[in-house]
Image (tube, rainbow, N blue to C red):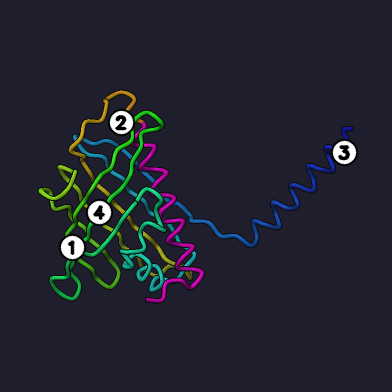
Amino acid sequence: MARRRRKKGLILLALAVLCSGTTHALEVRRLDVTFQGDRYVVILNAQLDAPPDAVGQVLKRYDDYPSLDPRILEAKVLSREREHSLRLYTRMRGCLGSLMCRSLQRVEQVEERPDEILATAVLDQSDVRFGVTRSQWQPQNGGTALQYRLEIMPKFWVPRFFGRRLMLSTLREGTLSLFTNVEREARTGHATP
């Protein structure tokens, strides 16, 4: 009986080693998710196993955001003021554990640069009192070094004790999921416009 379990364990270990050589994962160098003052702040520094141009293309395909982040129910460009300036609408479904779920709408003024996207919430059209997101990417070690920062303050009340902890957890998981999917899309060649 013990020999069979040991043999089964060795087979599982061998499969894990074989699979780990063929899969790539987002390499997180820093992930801080905190509540500072009256804002939730997310800072992610990561290495993506994908070319920087492809990462930028994926991040600039705004209508495809729901496929990158399951929390995003809808995303669409409302208008383009200039070549690299646009208004973006997103509707998200956010849950704090299984206790409280709600829809969050946000309109952002987005400024694009070759290796950066800066999105600032338009407060009178959004369910936030403050919102700024900055994504930057550059070539590094045959892949892409990513720096991401989100600062957000929702207009709705979040319970102080358990709510903040759940919100921080949701932001952490959502950020990791988003950029894992960005890496996958950019790496597999789905980044062509």
Q: CA distance from mark 2 to mark 4?
A: 20 Å
Residue 7 picture location, percent across and down: 85, 43
Q: Secondary structure at mark 2?
A: helix
Near mark 4 (Cα within 10 A), the count class, few <14, some 14-19 or many ≥20, is: some
Q: Which mark is residue 4?
A: 3
* Residue named by callout 1: 87
Where is the C terminus found, in terms of image quarters? bottom left
Near mark 2 (Cα within 10 A), the count class, few <14, some 14-19 or many ≥20, is: some
Please tell me whether mark 3 or mark 1 is closer to you in this view: 1
Residue 12, above or below 37: below
Mark 3 or mark 1, earlier in chain: 3
Residue 62: quarter of image: bottom left
Residue 3 picture location, percent across and down: 89, 37
* Residue named by callout 2: 164
The amino acid type found where label 1 is placed reads Arg
Q: State left or right for residue 101 relative to residue 128.
A: right
Q: CA distance from mark 2 to mark 1?
A: 29 Å
Q: CA distance from mark 2 to mark 3?
A: 47 Å
Which residue, as the protein is rendered here, is positioned at the far left? 124
Q: Which residues are magenta?
A: 166-193
Near mark 3 (Cα within 10 A), the count class, few <14, some 14-19 or many ≥20, is: few
- Main SS type for the magenta part? helix
Q: Nearer the viewer, residue 121 or 93?
A: 93
* Residue named by callout 4: 133
Q: CA distance from mark 4 to mark 3?
A: 53 Å
Q: Secondary structure at mark 1?
A: strand
The amino acid type found where label 4 is placed reads Thr
Q: CA distance from mark 1 to mark 4?
A: 14 Å
